[in-house]
Amino acid sequence: MAHEKRTIGFYILAVFFTLFVLFLYGPLSAILILSFQGETGGLTFPLNGVSLHWFANLFERQAVGDFGGSFRRSLVLGVMVMVVTVVVSLLAGLAFRQKFRGATALFYLAVASLVVPSIIISLGIGVVFQQIGFRPAWYTSAFGAHLTWTLPFGVLIMFAVFNRFSPAYEEAARDLGATSWQTFAHVVLPMIAPSLIGVGLFGFTLSYDEFARTLMTSGTFNTLPLEIYGMTTNVTTPVLYALGTVTTVFSFLVILATLGAILYVGRRRARA
């Protein structure tokens, strides 16, 4: 069987993709290598020995910074944002399946925060909290600021999902005597479960590494992105690279766990 001859456009796109991958993962590889610097090593090449010293030092008490506390705060905040994003996006997707007055205006209002500069939203929320007498904190004001970032994406994804969702499945379930709740729980929810997992991953990752909307709303305790930014101006040892490696590996583990969950749900749905 003869293979179709590749055009010049294929090679141009291949070169562009290769450059994109190098630009994306090149800095990460440099941080990964430098995180294994020897005990007497500095922040630059060449490596002065190879060791795991800076990984161990990362989990010790630091003279500057609080990696453990900031990581826990970002993790909890990311999970909070993920749960609310999934629930609200699902409810919004279900609600917009029915036409109602003001739906268009409500839709544009929901996604308007995407076009507003993040730092402006952060500043506005921080000022409002101070004016009403509440101290900004990562679990209140920063939580709301992150939702203004994650909810529009989640809502748009669910709109796309339900736009392609055939109501014939629901009609068949009702013809067989299923109630509205049974139809949702046993027909609609299993079919859109991979999309909900995707919305959850999207919400978590957007919150976990959000900097601008957290800057003015986190209060006295930093989240991980703010802590990393602070460490770049204070820390002069490779522990900063070790922190970058650990957080990158954690991010990839989250992605792999999500992909595993999507595959598991897909296999269960196929068997059913």
Image (cartoon, rainbow, N blue to C red):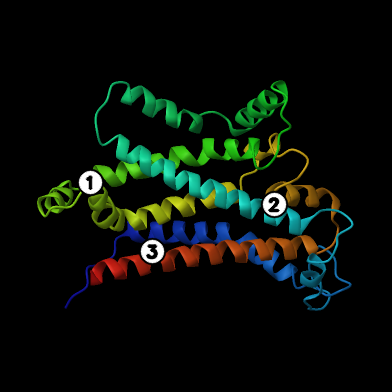
Other-residue count near label 1 (Cα within 10 Å), few / some / many at <14 / 14–19 / ≥20? few
From this view, report whether residue 1 is shown above or below residue 90. Answer: below
What kind of element bears circle 2?
Answer: helix
Residues at marks 1 and 3, CA–CA distance in whole angstroms: 25 Å
User: Can residue 30 be seen from the camera position used here?
Assistant: no
Of marks 1 and 3, the one in the foreground: 1
Give the label on residue 2, or none.
Answer: none
Q: Position of residue 133 (x, y in %)?
A: 73, 24
**Residue hosting label 3:** 262
Q: Amino acid at mark 1?
A: Ser
Tell which of 129 and 59 is nearer to you.
129
3D distance between C-alphas at marks 1 and 2: 43 Å
Q: Residue 197 versus residue 176: which sits nearer the camera?
A: 176
Position of residue 205 in the picture relative to residue 136 (left or right) = left
Under circle 3, the secondary element is helix
1 and 2 marks in contact (CB < 8 Å): no
- Quadrant where the C terminus sits is bottom left
Residue at left offset 43%, top offset 45%: 87
Badge 1 marks a residue whose secondary structure is helix
- Of label 1 and label 2, which has the lower sequence position? 1
Q: Is residue 168 above or below residue 113?
A: below
177 or 265, which is in the foreground?
177
Question: Mark 2 is on which residue type?
Answer: Leu
Q: Earlier in the sequence, mark 1 or mark 3?
A: 1
Residue 63 can be seen in this image? yes
Q: Which residue is mark 1?
A: 180
Q: Quadrant of residue 110?
A: top left
Residue designated by label 2: 224
Q: CA distance from mark 2 to mark 3?
A: 27 Å
Q: Residues within 10 Å of mark 3 (few under 14, many from 20)?
A: some
Q: Earlier in the sequence, mark 2 or mark 3?
A: 2
